[in-house]
Amino acid sequence: MTTTEPITTTRRLTGEYIIECENVHKWYGDFHALKGIDLHVKSGEVIVIIGPSGSGKSTFIRCLNRLEEHQEGEIVVDGITLSYDVRNIAEIRREVGMVFQQFNLFPHLTVLENVMLAPIHVRKWSRDRAEETAMKWLMRVGIPEQANKYPGQLSGGQQQRVAIARTLTMEPKILLFDEPTSALDPEMIKEVLDVMRDLAGGGYTILAVTHEMGFAREVADRVIFMDAGQIVEENIPENFFSNPKNERTKLFLSQILHH
Amino acid sequence: MSESSHRPPSSTYTTHERIPFWRDGRVLGVLAQILFVIVVGSVIYWFISNVAANLSRLGDSQFVCLYGTTEQWSYRCAFDFLSSEAQFDISESIIPYRTSDSYWQAIRVGLLNTVKVSFVGIILATILGTVAGIARLSQNWLVRNIAKTYIDIIRNTPLLLQLFFLYFVVLLLELPAVNAALQPFGLPVFISQRGVNFPKVVTLSSFAIWFAFIVLALIQAQFLWMYLGAREEKTGKTSSRLFWCVLSFFIVVGLGWLVASSTVHNEGFLVSRAARVREFSDLESLMERRLRLDNIRLLDEFVERGRLSAEEVSAAALLVCSVQGSPSEVNLTAQLRAAGIPYKVSRFARPDQAIDAYAEEATCDIFVAPKATLAAERNLLEDSANHMIVPVRETPARWAVPALEGFNFVGGSRMSLEFTALLVGLVVYTAAFIAEIVRAGILSVGKGQSEAARALGLSEGQRLRLIVLPQALRVIIPPLTSQYLNLTKNSSLALAVAYPDLWRVMSIIGNQSGRSIQPIILTALTYLTFSIVISLFLNWYNKRIQLVER
Ligand SMILES: Nc1ncnc2c1ncn2[C@@H]1O[C@H](COP(=O)(O)OP(=O)(O)OP(=O)(O)O)[C@@H](O)[C@H]1O
Ligand SMILES: [Mg+2]
């Protein structure tokens, strides 16, 4: 099993670990999906996770906001240990936002209602405050004029940007992206990546599963390669792409970079 | 997005290439419609001519009747016979009905009985079906499989069979006699061969005031909710809004109860001056004198120690006269029970009968009614000056709990066995189908929706209420409505358990009058009306909730 020391090479780290995972195991029935994940993430760090399909990338980041329950090891997010305590879970989910591959917008609500829903019902904000913040974020992701449309009326790229605005309006500290551009046509990928690039400089701690290598090179503090439920290799992007050490990493990179 | 000048071609434009008409989609479309109209037209023609032929064969005896004074046979009076006397009894009715009433009145009774069982059935089936549907999706193995077994068994046996089983085997054979009525979970609900007796709420005249307070409490809570919301926004601190609003609601409602009870004094009882009763508490001393006790509250102890026999107590009990079903009686007897005073009630249909009985001293010690009634009735007495009206405390509302007196339950409400059997049968049957609809509705909302809701921090309750249910309802409501319609139509199986619904009344009318076509027409029209109303609602609803798509 590879144990990895966190690498401390980045520009805007505060020195505090905001996510600490130690020896995290997860089984689906008999299937061992995560085999001892160790990862420490500092506040403000941007981490890109790559790896072949089925390697457990989604499973891992879904454990961080407890959409999946890990069965062994310890996960501490923002000082709170993830356990079956529902109050802890509720608290963590307020601080951890997640953007999905399939957007998962609520089709029965307008764009604005989608974005305002959680702040009103979870953060207990007034409608006015929620609307103000929602519009601010819709503006930031570049689609304020779509506020009163329904998700079904938007393009994929626009929907994903709404999903990002919806997550950000909750003012989370940590953002999880699970292949946010994989369901998009090439011309829409750019508009979503632009938004994510914009966020990466904004003090958020970001864990993104993505195969957009340009994005990883540009904004990641660390790139992590997962295979078969383990972290196989991690490094700063320059070294990771130019000088991969592990055979599996090399193979994977050669497949996605030259095809 | 907009190429403003380029408009779609109108239908009159001509293609450059000529298409033979048998391949031209536009021509084929029109042809298909013409063909369809011809087919439908001929089916309808066949149907009508068939009915007309049959009617003319039956017609002389059944459908046509004597019209006017001169001998003239006509269809115009076909329904006139329904104005004549029904002459048959109907076992239960919401509205007054006697055998001397017309067939029309009988039909109205049947219709209301159908509406009653359908209405209550729809509400209960929805509740049971929703619970079973959610249970079917439960993580818990036992819960899930109980729900599954129930749904599978019920859906795969005919309703008529279930009704027969329920009525004849379970209810008629197994239920105890009235004096050994079943009392499930110790609740004041009594199930016996006489039906199901259960408590009801009776309201007294001060209820209006209390009701006003309830409305006030609601408005007040609403304002408090908004005020606290605004304050939360200002200070940025969350307060337990819900707690304070609920608390203040109940405080105002409780206050209203006190105000209403202390300001309205409409209740009283009539008692002879000789009894030396000036106020309610004097009743206690009256009974103490009669039973030769120091303190009426020690009565139970005396009986236990054998110093007083049950017969003696019964002989000395306070005799109360009242008008059948009057809230005044419920109000008084509740206080008599609280004071430990043994009493017996005689009930009369009208106040004047009660005052007559009161006049014969042996029948009643007191006559309980609203003060105004008492004052009016007292004037009927020869020695009216010898009787006084004693005020009784009243509360806005009281529970009337059924109690066995002789071989009947008095107080509370009663459901007949026939109604119960039909209701339970319809509810259990329809709920199994509704459960499947609810399950399908919930499953139709993708897993991603729940994950997004959870990831945003919504609680499980909020996730269900704000995300899953609104979307599931779009899928659930249309088939649900047709289950409601099914339940209403299935209620005509009432025939099997002798519940007098519309169809049973109509069958009796058909048999008795020898005219079978008119009842069938009326019944068909009624059920058709139900169907049309429900489908109109459905169309309106579907239009309203359609998801907006690109
Ligand atoms: N709910 C589940 N039940 C059983 N097995 C599961 C479940 N979810 C995931 N798995 C399995 O766990 C493994 C890891 O899945 P995961 O979705 O994390 O992979 P991934 O790295 O995100 O892949 P992809 O790039 O295709 O999204 C896969 O082999 C998958 O089949
Ligand atoms: Mg994945």
Image: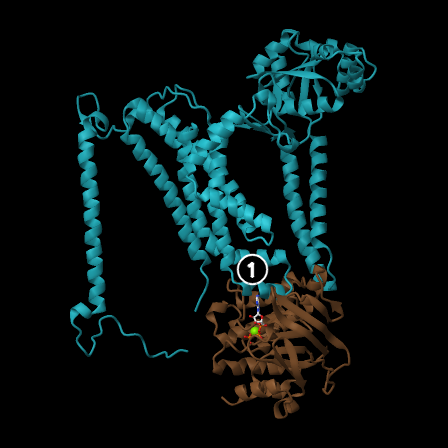
Chain colours: A brown, B cyan
Please name the residue shown 54% across and 63% down the image: B447
Q: Amino acid at mark 1?
A: Ile
Question: Quick one: quadrant of the N terminus of chain B?
Answer: bottom left
Outermost residue, right side: B294
- The structure residue drawn at horizontal position 60% and vertical position 59%, both measured from the top left corner, is B463
Provide residue B446's location: percent of width, then percent of height.
Answer: 52, 63
Which quadrant of the figure shows ligand 1?
bottom right
Where residue A103 sits: x, y (%)? 54, 71
In the picture of the structure, the residue carrying the numbered disc 1 is: B467
Q: Is residue B10 visible?
A: yes
Q: In the figure, residue A252 lies in which quadrant?
A: bottom right
Instruction: Residue B177 in the image: state x and y as whole percent.
Output: 56, 21
Residue A24 higher or lower than B345, as above or below: below
Label 1 SS: helix
**Mark 1, residues whose alpha carbon is within 10 Å: few (<14), some, or many (≥20)?**
many
Residue B133: give x, y in percent of width and height. 53, 49
Is A234 drawn above or below residue A78 in the view shown? below
Q: Quadrant of residue A20?
A: bottom right
At x 68% / y 78%, what residue is drawn? A204
- State the image quarter where residue B522 is shown: top left
